[in-house]
Image: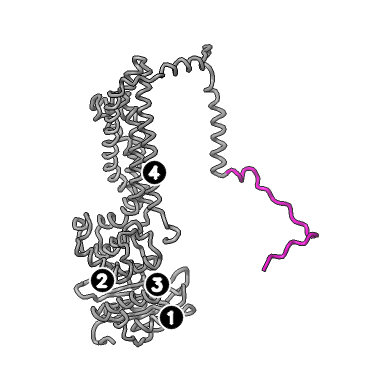
Amino acid sequence: MQDKKQEPVLSARGIGLQRGGRWLFRDLDLDLYAGEFLAIVGPSGVGKTTLLSCLCGMLEPSEGSVSFKLSGTSDSKPVELRRHFGIVYQDLQLIPNADLLTNVLCGRLGRFNSLNTLLGFPKKLRQEAYRLLYELGVAENPHKWAKHMSGGEKQRVAAARVLFQKPKIYFADEPVSSLDAYYAGRVLGLLRQEADEKAKPVLCVLHNAEHIQRFADIALSLNQNDPKAHKMRRVRPLNVEAQV
Amino acid sequence: MSPTPTPEHEKVPPLAELPWYRRLNLLNTTLLIFVLAVIFSGSQIEGNERDLDILKNLGRFLSDFFPPDLSVLKSTGSALIETVEIAILATFFAIIISLIIALGAAQTIGPTWLVFSMRMLLNIIRTIPSLIWAVIAVAAMGANAMAGVAALTLYSTGYLGKFFSEAFESVDMKVARSLRGIGADPLQSFQYGIWPHAKPLIWSHCIWMLEYNIRSASIIGYVGAGGLGLQLHAYQEFHQWDRFATVLCCILIVVTVLDFLSERIRRRIARRDGSNDALSD
């Protein structure tokens, strides 16, 4: 559990989003501290992805505000901080006509200028990216184009890319929806490890109750019938390190 | 549950057919216009009031082509090499220029004013046929192969610029935007977010253009821009049709081989680009 005396890394106050005349959620307050793993849960279509998009600045909330206090940065607005966010999109947004290794390496494009990456990435980085692919079981053919991989393999590549990026905060939209129990545990375990060992906050849309119990600190559930009836509950985390 | 069948005694209302004007969609309208245009153009198929035995004339003319005079094979070979070199250089320069223009002409990349002006430029270049470009280039640079390279470069730029900009526009910009989101600069976002998607299509267009340019390069020599055309022109002037036939045979062989190779390569690129789509996307 986090020390409440420290400032929250992410702070949302009274955020709400209206779409097509309907409120998906309203009056939502959220404080997320360093090293906390938040699971956003709820039935399909309730607005989990939309909430995640509002929190990471990809979508402007209809009301309320989101601010960040990230170490080493003076900005607080999500739009200005995007380069420090590690995002796993629901549709993954991999580069289909690039190989798996390049897809992972692209996670760190923001650290280099275009001249450094014009002829590719340094060998040391390539080995580091390969290690992540290996850890997630997609290292068999790192030079294969992403578009030729299965849905589950692509999802693991997307996870490897975000981990390789080494962001200050993670936003993951159903990052394990196409994975079997083993690799789902592995991906979520690595995110949990980032939270535990590097005190990075993780926000993750999850459906599986077992995953929430095993990996999350807090579960925020949205309600389909009442946009104000969202619930926040503490989840007791298990010792996940043994499972990584 | 299966739908209940209509009882036999129930009267089925008569089918309301579409009136004729409702069938005039774009496809049918353009077809109709084309048929009308063919009918009106029929007046061109008329004799010139001289009683010519067309078939006999054609037979006599074609017999002059045979047998081809193979003694000019050596000079034809060197002209053929020059033709291919003109085409290769023109395609190369056109690719470089077109890539730059296409970046500005792609709606998903360039600002509106730049897109508009680049497209206008490409339209103007495309309007002028390669032979006219060759006449202009020969007037400006003299009768040599360099004029051929310049003419075909300009001509190809009109097409490649359009094809490349369409290739860039076909790319889903989400990936490029997400790369920008994590701090990639515009060049990195292009190199890793747009280029990999557009590359197979662009390369396929380049191969097609090279093939096209080799055909064109054999003709532009007619106006003095180097290559086989120059030789063709000379043999035509002196009515040496047997030599003319040798040059034509060489062009035929090269173009056929190139057409075969180009089609296979482009098909393989397309297959690699699109394979397993149904499974993985």
Q: Nearer the viewer, residue A13 or A99?
A: A99
Whole-percent x and y of residue A123? 20, 61
Is residue A214 positioned above or below A143 on the image? Answer: below
How far apart, in angstroms, are the residues tagged by discs 4 and 2? 45 Å
How far apart, in angstroms, are the residues tagged by discs 2 and 3? 23 Å
> Callout 2: 10 Å neighbours few (<14), some, many (20+)?
many
Compared across the picture, whether B109 is left or right of A180 comes to left
In the image, are marks 2 and 3 on the same chain? yes
User: Which chain contains the residue that carries disc 1?
Assistant: A
Q: Nearer the viewer, residue B197 or B166?
A: B197
Residue A54 magenta: no
User: Which is more foreground, mark 4 or mark 1?
Assistant: 4
- The residue under label 3 is which amino acid type? Leu
How far apart, in angstroms, are the residues tagged by discs 3 and 4? 38 Å
Residue at the spot of label 3:
A179
User: Which is more foreground, mark 3 or mark 4?
Assistant: 4
Disc 4 and disc 2 in contact, CB within 8 angstroms: no
Task: Please identify the quarter of the rendering in which residue A3 is found.
Answer: bottom left
User: Which is more foreground, mark 3 or mark 1?
Assistant: 3
What is the quadrant of the C terminus of chain B in the image?
bottom left
Whole-percent x and y of residue B25? 56, 44
Lower sequence index among marks 2 and 3: 2
How far apart, in angstroms, are the residues tagged by discs 4 and 1? 61 Å
Q: Which residues are magenta?
A: B1-24
Residue at the spot of label 4:
B264
Residue at the spot of label 1:
A228
Of helix, strand and loop, which one carries label 1?
loop
